[in-house]
Image: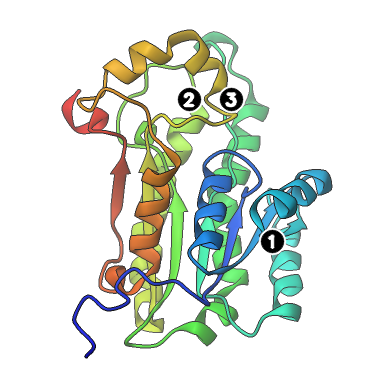
C-alpha cells in the first residue's frame, strides 16, 4: 500500500543541470543527485573540468561560459538536443572578488554580477521550454538558485560585489517564483554558509576553526547538508515551496 511518505524525497529519473557543477558546492550537489538516481548535466568554462566531473561524479559535462547570454542560450540548445525536458535547474555557477574598499575595481562588479545575477536570469529564460515540458500541477519543474548567507547579512570580508550579487539572487528568486508559478515551476534559493570549496579554501585555511566555532553547531557544512536541501526542493517533498530562501549555515546567520 502506498503511504503519504512514499517517494517523498525521490528524484530517480529526473533530468537536472547543475551549473558550476565541476567543483565546490556545485560538485557536491551534482554528485548527490547522481547518487539519488537523477540524470545530471554539469557545466563549467573549462572542458578539462567537465571531463574530470564526468569521470568523478557520473554527470555529463558540457563546457560553457555562462557570463555570456549567448552561451546560456547555447547550453540550453545543447541539452535540448539530448533531452525532451528539464526537471531541475540548479543555478550555482558563481564568482567572488575581494579587495579593500579604496581599491575595489569596476571590473570586479562586472565579472561578479554578470555570472552571479545575470546568468541565473538568462539561463532560466533559455531553459523555460524544457522546464515547462517537465512541469505539472502535481509535480512542478524546479529552479534552485544558490545564494549565500553573505546576501542575508553584512559580511565580514571585503567582498562588495559578491555579497550584493547574492542579495540580488535572493530577490530574483522571489520575483521569478511569482513569474513562473503559473507555469508550474517553483523557484527557490539555498543560502549556504561556510562549506569546503575552492572559493572558501583560503579563508578556511586561515580561520577555519574560528568560523566553525561561530556556528551554534560548531562546524562548517558537509556535502550532505547542501545535497539534502537540494533533494528536498527537487523532490515531491518540496512541491509546494516556492520563493523561499533557505539558509544552510548551521545557524550562523540567524544567531550572530
Count neighbours of disc 1 (C-alpha within 10 A) and say few if under 14, some if 14 to 19, many if 20 or more.
many
Q: Residue at the spot x=60%, y=72% of the render?
A: 127
Q: Are marks 2 and 1 in contact (CB under 8 Å)?
A: no
Left or right of residue 149: residue 70: right
**5 relative to 179 in the view: left or right:** left
Residue found 76% across the figure and 46% down from its top:
52
Are discs 3 and 1 less than 8 Å apart at CB?
A: no
Name the residue at the front extreme: 1
Asked which quadrant contains residue 122, the reply is bottom right
Q: Is residue 235 left or right of residue 3?
A: right
Name the spot of residue 250 as percent of width and height, x first.
Answer: 27, 33
Q: Which residue is mark 3?
A: 97
Q: Secondary structure at mark 2?
A: helix
Judge whether residue 65 can be spotted in this image: no
Among the two numbered marks 2 and 1 on one chain, the one whose residue lies closer to the N terminus: 1
Element under disc 3: loop
In this rendering, the answer to whether 121 lies above or below 21 is below
Q: Secondary structure at mark 1?
A: helix
Amino acid at each position: 500500500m502506498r503511504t503519504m511518505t512514499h517517494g517523498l524525497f525521490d528524484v530517480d529519473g529526473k533530468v537536472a543541470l547543475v551549473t558550476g557543477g565541476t567543483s565546490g558546492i556545485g560538485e557536491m550537489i551534482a554528485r548527490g543527485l547522481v547518487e539519488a538516481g537523477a540524470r545530471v548535466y554539469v557545466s563549467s568554462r573549462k572542458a578539462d573540468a567537465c571531463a574530470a566531473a564526468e569521470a568523478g561524479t557520473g554527470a555529463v559535462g558540457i563546457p560553457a561560459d555562462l557570463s555570456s547570454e549567448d552561451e546560456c542560450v547555447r547550453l540550453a540548445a545543447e541539452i535540448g538536443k539530448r533531452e525532451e525536458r528539464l526537471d531541475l535547474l540548479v543555478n550555482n555557477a558563481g564568482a567572488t572578488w575581494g579587495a579593500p574598499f579604496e581599491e575595489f575595481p569596476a571590473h570586479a562588479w562586472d565579472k561578479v554580477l554578470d555570472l552571479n545575477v545575470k546568468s541565473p536570469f538568462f539561463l532560466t529564460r533559455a531553459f523555460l521550454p524544457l522546464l515547462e515540458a517537465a512541469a505539472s500541477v502535481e509535480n512542478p519543474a524546479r529552479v534552485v538558485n544558490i545564494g549565500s548567507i553573505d546576501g542575508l547579512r553584512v559580511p565580514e570580508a571585503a567582498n562588495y560585489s559578491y555579497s550584493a550579487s547574492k542579495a540580488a539572487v535572493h530577490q530574483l528568486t522571489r520575483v521569478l517564483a511569482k513569474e513562473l508559478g503559473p507555469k508550474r515551476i517553483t523557484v527557490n534559493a539555498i543560502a549556504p554558509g561556510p562549506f569546503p570549496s575552492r572559493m572558501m579554501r583560503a579563508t578556511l585555511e586561515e580561520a577555519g576553526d574560528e568560523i566553525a566555532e561561530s556556528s551554534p553547531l560548531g562546524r562548517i557544512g558537509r556535502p550532505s547538508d547542501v545535497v539534502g536541501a537540494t533533494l528536498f526542493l527537487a523532490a515531491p517533498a518540496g512541491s509546494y515551496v516556492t520563493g523561499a530562501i533557505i539558509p544552510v549555515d548551521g545557524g550562523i546567520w540567524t544567531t550572530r
